Image (tube, rainbow, N blue to C red):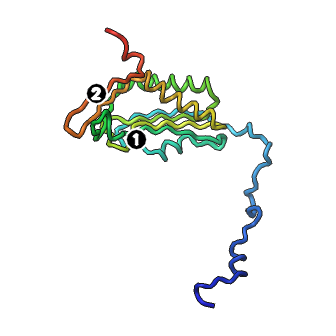
Amino acid sequence: MSSLEISSSSFSREMKLPLSPPLVEGSAQQPLGEDLNEVEEKSKDIIKFTTEKLSIDEVSQLVISPLCGALSLFVGTTRNNFEGKKVISLEYEAYLPMAENEIRKICSDIRQKWPVKHIAVFHRLGLVPVSEASIIIAVSSAHRASSLQAVSYAIDTLKAKVPIWKKEMYEESSSSWKRNKECFWATVVF
């Protein structure tokens, strides 16, 4: 037999998979309905503002739960253009005490509207280059509808209520602070 030939008997023998995984002593799973309510896991709201690069993996790991079948993410990134101008980065500033308080209110609102387990909201401050994440919102829940709706509500409400400001840095050495059109206090006349 040459090195390119495959014996049909050795091929089928190698490809056979057990119908169910072998049990390892001491690793048998609990029967399905047995005391699932005994599994206690405290819900978490994790809020972080940082000048460091955001990690999607890190944020998503914080909300994973064995009680949940869904994890939904929103990742907002810096795009390379705005109204025909080439954007090279964004710069974010926030009034942290108020921003953290408003995000806590958003988390509380989410918990009243949907049955979610964990919520993480990470926002970057300072310079954020093109294609890097400015914000990551992660929500876990038993079912996808709740986490998807919660993530959408979180980003929409954050943009409307949280005091975070964005400055666009353009290639031609100019920059522009952007008014958040969705923010309720941006329309207040002083």
Q: Nearer the viewer, mark 1 or mark 2?
A: 2
Residue 177: mark in rendering = 2
- The CA span between labels 1 and 2 is 19 Å
- Identify the residue shown where x is 53% and y is 31%: 152
Residue 11, horizontal then vertical, whole percent: 68, 78
In this picture, residue 79 sits left or right of residue 9: left
Residue 83, horizontal then vertical, whole percent: 31, 33
In this picture, residue 26 sits left or right of residue 6: right
Q: Quadrant of the N terminus?
A: bottom right
Quarter location, residue 35:
top right
In this picture, residue 88 sits left or right of residue 17: left
Q: Amino acid at mark 1?
A: Ala
Quarter location, residue 18:
bottom right
Q: 10 Å neighbourhood of mark 1: few (<14), some, or many (≥20)?
A: many
Quarter location, residue 132:
top left
Helix, strand or loop for disc 1: strand
